[in-house]
Image (cartoon, helix red, strand yellow):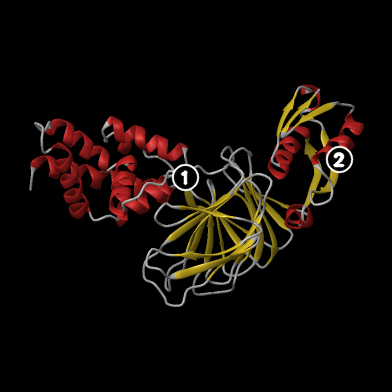
Amino acid sequence: MNNHLYKTMNRNSQLLDILREIVSKRNFDTSKIELLPLEDQELIKNLQSNGLLEEALLYLESIDVDKNWEELQEKLNLEKKSVVINWRNIFQYAAMFFCVLGLVYVFQYKTGKQNNKVVSPDAIQLVLENGDIQILNPNGEQQIIKKNGEVVASQKENAINYKSAKPINKLVYNEIKIPFGKTFKITLSDGTLVNMNAGSSLKYPVQFIKGRNREVALDGEAFFDVAKDKAHPFIVKTRGVNVKVLGTKFNVSSYKEDTDINTVLVEGSVSLSDAANANTKTTLVPGEKGSWNSENTEIAIEKVDTRFYTEWINGEIVFRKTAFKDIIIKLERTYNVTIDNNRKDILDKKFNASFNKNIESIEKVLETMSKIQGFTYKIEGKHIKIN
């Protein structure tokens, strides 16, 4: 084997091992990362900041190194057969091949197509296992089809339902991304129902595999009604907390811009554990909220009225002793607007209020709140200024 190829494959193996450790532990081992070349260190940082670590790992594990290397060589030879080949540049390109940009390039070359579709930020996106993006129209109907032609899900209006006729032995993932101003429902292959809130994403297997935990990854907020299966625990992974259940109803809110990750239990029982320290565990009973943030070493528990945390499913927006700065964030998500607040004196003031987004417009909400706090506002399209 060519010595350059051997070094490149070795580098790929090292990168793969470190990605596995980062994804499993949900944190960085700085000393190990520093062993990688500088471009790989930068790659990992970019993957982490864009939430693409798991996708990169899944793809690295799925490719055939030898086969893809041969395809890359053929491509390079075809392009350069009439010129003197600069092997140093080729091997620099080959090193990039085993990074995410290289992986995407090879995949697109294999399938013979480029995904240049411009996706509207207001669209509900379904990212398929091959990276293609399918737009889900909340008023439409369509089937979700795997590469082999098998129908794995069907979408009707504001919901998608996953079903598979035959069992599989390899996890294949889809990811759904819900924009601001919209909500959506997903029925997973085991019958678990997930209500997705605005500005959220969920990564999940197209079909769960017998003998393995049912694991999904959430960014944002969702309400889970988990199908009971004692042999296969259901685990929701967030950026800081893992929620483990057998069958129950609960709400998880894990928006990146929020300080706390909150889990509210409606029915059944859930176990919360720090993603970076599995030994830190807490069990909730119905009517309790577990809160975690990176500055605390323990998960705080309090009794709550669960309706305040779950009524968003029915369009309700409930504020209970909520600071105005947090209300602004929630209104932006719910109504898909941008709010510039020039009244810094009321940022920390707390409100009690409730609205229904299906009945009251953002203008009606602001009109009501402005009478309480005495501010003025101006609405221009999706942009709002508060003075």
Helix, strand or loop status at disc 2: helix
Rendered position, 71 above or below 160: above
**Camera-nearest residue between 123 and 62:** 123
In the picture, the disc for residue 320 is none
Q: Residue at x 76, y 22 (%)?
A: 342
Mark 1, residue position: 117
Relative to residue 107, is residue 123 drawn left or right?
A: right
Q: Residue 63: image x %, image y %?
A: 28, 55
Q: Residue 241: image x %, image y %?
A: 55, 50
Choose top left, top right, bottom left or bottom right for residue 14.
Answer: top left
Q: Are marks 2 and 1 in contact (CB under 8 Å)?
A: no
Question: What's under tag 1, amino acid-wise?
Answer: Lys
The reply to whether residue 7 is visible in this rendering is no
Question: What's under tag 2, amino acid-wise?
Answer: Lys
**Of the image marks 2 and 1, the number of the one nearer the N terminus:** 1
Bin the neighbour count of mark 2 within 10 Å (Cα to Cα): few under 14, some 14-19, many 20 and up: few
Q: Residue 332: image x %, image y %?
A: 70, 38
Instruction: Specify the quadrant that holds the C terminus.
Output: top right
Q: Residue at x 8, y 44 (%)?
A: 2
Relative to residue 138, is residue 304 drawn left or right?
A: right
Q: Residue 249: image x %, image y %?
A: 66, 65
Choose top left, top right, bottom left or bottom right for residue 46.
Answer: top left
Rendered position, 219 above or below 313: above
Q: Kindly report the distance in space between the C-alpha atoms of the residues bearing marks 2 and 1.
A: 37 Å
Relative to residue 372, is residue 339 drawn left or right?
A: left
Mark 2, residue position: 364
Q: Residue furthest right?
A: 371
Q: Residue furthest front?
A: 82
Bin the neighbour count of mark 1 within 10 Å (Cα to Cα): few under 14, some 14-19, many 20 and up: few
Depth check, mark 2 against mark 1: the one in front is 1
